[in-house]
Image (cartoon, grey):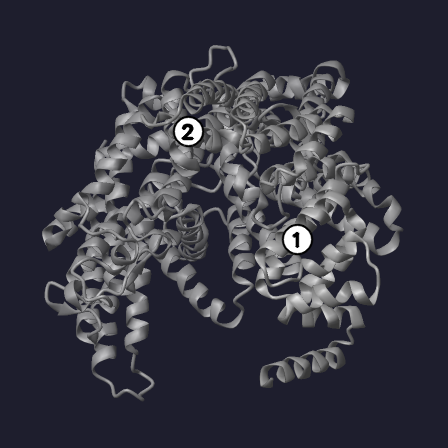
């Protein structure tokens, strides 16, 4: 008696405190005394099975909850989710645990027919991971009408993955075989469990055949995984190489032409990245959100011009006075780089990020297990465009001809009337602009921070040194080699020792080819 | 060629050096020891210790000056050799902490918290002072021999060499930062207590270390001066001014370069060896790319190609740094960067160059006739080291 009074008192306070509607108050009471609630409820109003299940899901008894959950999953849809969430917010721990999978299932099932392939895919993946056999029919149904192969693949994978836990060995066997054909790396742990279960001597015959099939599937999946891994590694290597390439191109041209090692090249790249960032902020501040994505193409010329301008000033104020004094230019430009870095740190602070435009977010699933992010693909394409553009500029334009002439023989070119100092200034500004473009592209793959240039500068120098002076082909091959080696060694040794190995490799390589891959041919005793 | 009389500028240098050595060796410790604490003449323990640190850097700068100022080979990796020396000494000092450590273990603290149960094998030689001392000199020397042999024999020179050594500094920094190299990772080695039974916190020990540093600096200076004045020193300068002609004259430049590179590495190791007990900590941050480059700026500011300039530059820049970072902590990178630019473009001969010019003008006024400039003072119009454009 005393206890019942207490319950009533608590229920009443709850109604007051949380402004529950009467049915919820009832539910709460039902929480305490389930039997009376389910007996008395129908007598009040005639309610549908779904509503009944909504009440039962908050029951204290496990069986009642489970049955209610089954009804909800079978008959309910996404419209129930707000109601379930409301019950969950107030239910006990056990009730919350009972409701969670129901909500997830309903939500994901609704998402299976969403308009966005990404939503459909992640819903299918979630359903597969949930381990609820109820989801199998939905998944199969959705897979039958799905048009995007990668989404369809995920749906089939999820359905078969769920069937692995089925009671019927025949269904299990079919699922095992299908998963092997699908090369589903997600199901490897479960397949291995089946293998181990079947290996016990006392296991019944169907379990043993299942284990054999699982073994075959796992082998299939793993050999596929190896290949997928190799492809992804190669892709990462090419991606890193193309970043290095864009950076090193400008560096190599200047080094070849003027013999100047521009230590501030990384910071010119940083200027390009910050120019992109500033453009983005300007778009956020002054333009409507619909045109936001246009900041990215707009910031390309901005980044180029900002870096080229900075390079032009650098050439006019510092480098001009140091021609022929290579080591001095190295030191002076290093000083400039320190100043620029600190200026960026003081002005912008340490962390600023550029939001990638919609088109470059996400990636392409080119085959099972191989996912290529769009931003990386974009950078690879960009580096190809840069190489082609530079090739045309150097070998098909008048300026390019002059640049090549001065690179080969400065004095002779001057005698023939080429304004060598002007050529130097233009080339330096252009190479700086290239660094700006590299910075623009780098905002897609990482944060913009003052140390941005430093991360790549040592590697870029290695590329220039390995490639040889003033040879486009040398720079391309060297950046492919160094970028590729970096990513190839990394899985075995870790990033740090990978870099150390590359350094040792470059030193040994220079033993064999002291002036780089593609040395200028000639009778130069210094070469 | 008859041996010329000691040029006037050299005599002057000797005088200045002797005077400076006297002040550093006798006057400063006395100022620390004798006057009362509140007297204006009193030099605090902190200042004396700081001077000791600057003089360690001066030894490091002497090494770089030898290879860059005299031989024209720009090494951007001196910090690595400094780090080898410092870490070797640091390992000895770490093992001397013994049971005084925070965790009371015989192992250094960082090993306790990185779950290292046994002393790694390569730490064993550093249990004794002799091991630490020899290691601090020999490890850099050995490493420089291998690296230099590979680099110089294949005629990697000029900018190429600078970049390779910079990559070396970068790689060393990466490796020393790792925990699995068992050298304390990012935190480095620190919290030293004693060396050879002397408490490091004791002002008397620090004073002794300071005097040792001054003596080491004098020895290093004399060694460098002897090398520079020797026949080999002449070849070094010839290599700087035109390596091709030296080759054509029948010399093998790379042997000379290797020799001087190894000497520079040994001096860097010595500098690290003295640095650690005085400063009490060594971390990877002191051996990376930037610290290695800072050595170059010390020499450039002081006046490269002059031994006294290297010492002067190291002390001046570091003193300026300690003063300025006190008042404007954010401004130091600007100043350092500005120094790089201004010194290189406007004052290629550094402080010593400016002083020399002043004195030369005075000499000219007092004694008409061509003034002598020592072999160590290249005329401003001469091509700079590494100036041979390929």
Q: Is residue A186 left or right of residue B265?
A: right
Q: Nearer the viewer, mark 2 or mark 1?
A: 1
How many numbered discs? 2
Q: Secondary structure at mark 1?
A: loop
Mark 2 — residue? Answer: A502
Residue B214 pos. (x, y %): 22, 61
Residue A150 location, x and y as percent?
69, 26
To which quarter of the image does residue B375 belong? Answer: top left
Q: Is residue B325 left or right of residue A280?
A: left
Residue at 54% in and 59% down:
B335
- Pointer 1 residue: A352
Read off the chain for label 1.
A
> Between A82 and A292, which is closer to the camera in this rendering?
A82
Q: Return the x and y of residue B135 as percentages of the image width and height.
A: 17, 46
Question: x, y percentage for residue A466?
Answer: 48, 23
Mark 2 vs mark 1: tell me if same chain. Answer: yes
Image mark 2: chain: A
Q: Which quarter of the rendering shows the N terminus of chain A?
A: bottom right
The quarter of the displayed image where residue A513 is located: top left
What quarter of the picture does the C terminus of chain A occupy? top left
Left or right placement of residue A134 versus residue A201 in this view: right
Please indicate, yes or no, whether residue B219 appears anywhere in the rendered image. Answer: yes
Can see residue B5? no
């Amino acid at each position: 008696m005393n206890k019942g009074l207490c319950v009533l008192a608590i229920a009443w306070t709850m109604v007051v405190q949380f402004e529950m509607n009467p049915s919820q108050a009832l539910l709460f009471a039902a929480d305490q005394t389930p039997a009376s609630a389910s007996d008395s409820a129908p007598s009040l109003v005639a309610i549908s099975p779904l509503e009944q299940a909504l009440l039962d899901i908050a029951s204290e008894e496990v069986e009642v909850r489970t049955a209610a959950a089954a009804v909800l999953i079978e008959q309910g849809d996404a419209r129930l989710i707000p109601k379930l969430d409301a019950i969950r917010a107030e239910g006990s721990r056990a009730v919350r645990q009972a409701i969670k999978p129901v909500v997830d299932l309903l939500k994901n099932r609704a998402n299976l027919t969403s308009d966005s392939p990404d939503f459909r895919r992640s819903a299918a993946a979630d359903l597969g991971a949930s381990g609820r056999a109820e989801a199998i029919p939905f998944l199969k149904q959705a897979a039958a009408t799905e048009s995007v192969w990668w989404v369809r693949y995920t749906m089939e994978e999820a359905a078969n993955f769920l069937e692995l836990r089925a009671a019927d060995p025949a269904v299990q066997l079919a699922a095992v075989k299908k998963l092997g054909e699908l090369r589903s790396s997600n199901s490897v742990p479960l397949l291995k469990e089946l293998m181990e279960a079947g290996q016990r001597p006392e296991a019944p015959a169907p379990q043993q055949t299942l284990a054999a099939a699982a073994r075959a599937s796992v082998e299939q999946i793993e050999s596929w995984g190896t290949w997928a891994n190799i492809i992804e590694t190669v892709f990462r290597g090419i991606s890193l190489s193309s970043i290095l390439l864009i950076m090193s191109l400008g560096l190599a041209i200047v080094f070849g032409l003027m013999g100047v090692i521009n230590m501030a090249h990384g910071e010119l790249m940083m200027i390009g990245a910050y120019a992109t960032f500033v453009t983005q902020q300007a778009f956020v501040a002054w333009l409507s959100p619909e045109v936001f994505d246009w900041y990215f193409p707009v910031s390309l010329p901005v980044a180029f011009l900002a870096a080229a301008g900075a390079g032009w000033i650098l050439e006019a104020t510092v480098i001009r006075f140091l021609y022929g004094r290579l080591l001095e230019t190295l030191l002076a430009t290093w000083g400039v780089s320190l100043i620029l870095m600190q200026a960026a740190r003081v002005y912008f602070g340490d962390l600023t990020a550029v939001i990638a435009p919609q088109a470059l977010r996400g990636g392409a699933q080119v085959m099972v297990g191989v996912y290529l992010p769009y931003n990386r693909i974009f950078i690879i394409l960009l580096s190809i465009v840069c190489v082609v553009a530079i090739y045309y500029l150097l070998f098909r334009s008048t300026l390019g001809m002059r640049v090549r002439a001065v690179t080969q023989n400065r004095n002779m070119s001057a005698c023939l009337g080429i304004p060598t100092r002007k050529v130097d200034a233009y080339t330096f500004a252009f190479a700086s602009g290239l660094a700006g473009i590299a910075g623009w592209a780098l905002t897609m793959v990482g944060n913009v921070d003052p140390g941005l240039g430093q991360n790549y500068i040592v590697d870029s120098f290695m590329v220039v040194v390995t490639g040889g002076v003033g040879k486009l082909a040398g720079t391309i091959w060297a950046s492919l080699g160094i970028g590729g080696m970096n990513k190839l060694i990394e899985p075995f040794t870790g990033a740090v020792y990978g870099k150390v190995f590359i350094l040792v490799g470059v030193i040994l390589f220079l033993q064999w080819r002291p002036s780089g891959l593609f040395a200028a041919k000639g009778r130069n005793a210094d070469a | 060629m008859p041996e010329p009389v000691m040029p006037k500028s050299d005599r002057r240098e000797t005088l200045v050096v002797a005077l400076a050595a006297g002040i550093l060796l006798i006057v400063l410790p006395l100022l620390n020891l004798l006057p009362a604490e509140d007297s204006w003449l009193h030099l605090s323990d902190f200042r004396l210790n700081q001077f000791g640190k600057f003089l360690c850097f001066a030894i490091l700068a002497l090494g770089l000056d030898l290879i860059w100022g005299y031989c024209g080979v720009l090494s951007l990796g001196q910090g690595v050799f400094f780090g080898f020396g410092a870490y070797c000494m640091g390992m000895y000092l770490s093992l001397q902490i013994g049971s005084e450590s925070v965790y009371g273990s015989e192992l250094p603290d960082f090993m306790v918290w990185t779950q290292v149960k046994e002393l790694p094998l390569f730490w064993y030689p550093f249990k004794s002072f002799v091991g630490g001392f020899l290691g601090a000199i020999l490890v850099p020397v050995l490493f420089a021999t291998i690296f230099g042999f590979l680099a110089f024999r294949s005629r990697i020179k000029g900018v190429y060499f600078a970049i390779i050594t910079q990559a070396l500094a970068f790689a060393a920094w990466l490796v020393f930062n790792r925990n699995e190299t068992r050298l304390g990772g990012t935190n480095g080695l620190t919290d030293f207590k004693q060396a050879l039974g002397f408490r490091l916190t004791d002002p008397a020990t620090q004073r002794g270390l300071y005097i040792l540093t001054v003596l080491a600096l004098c020895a290093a200076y004399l060694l460098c001066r002897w090398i520079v004045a020797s026949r080999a020193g002449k070849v070094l300068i010839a290599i700087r001014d035109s390596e091709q002609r030296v080759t054509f004259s029948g010399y093998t430049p790379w042997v000379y370069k290797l020799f001087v590179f190894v000497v520079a590495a040994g001096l860097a190791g010595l500098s690290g060896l003295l640095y650690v007990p005085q400063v009490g900590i060594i971390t990877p941050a002191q051996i990376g790319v930037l610290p290695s480059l800072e050595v170059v700026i010390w020499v450039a500011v002081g006046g490269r190609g002059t031994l006294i300039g290297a010492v002067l530059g190291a002390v001046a820049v570091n003193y300026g740094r300690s003063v300025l970072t006190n008042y404007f902590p954010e401004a130091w990178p600007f100043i350092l960067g500005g120094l790089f630019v201004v010194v290189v473009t406007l004052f290629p001969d550094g402080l010593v160059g400016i002083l020399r010019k002043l004195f030369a003008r005075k000499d000219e006024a007092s004694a008409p006739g061509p003034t002598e400039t020592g072999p160590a003072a290249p005329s401003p119009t001469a091509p700079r080291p590494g100036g041979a454009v390929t």
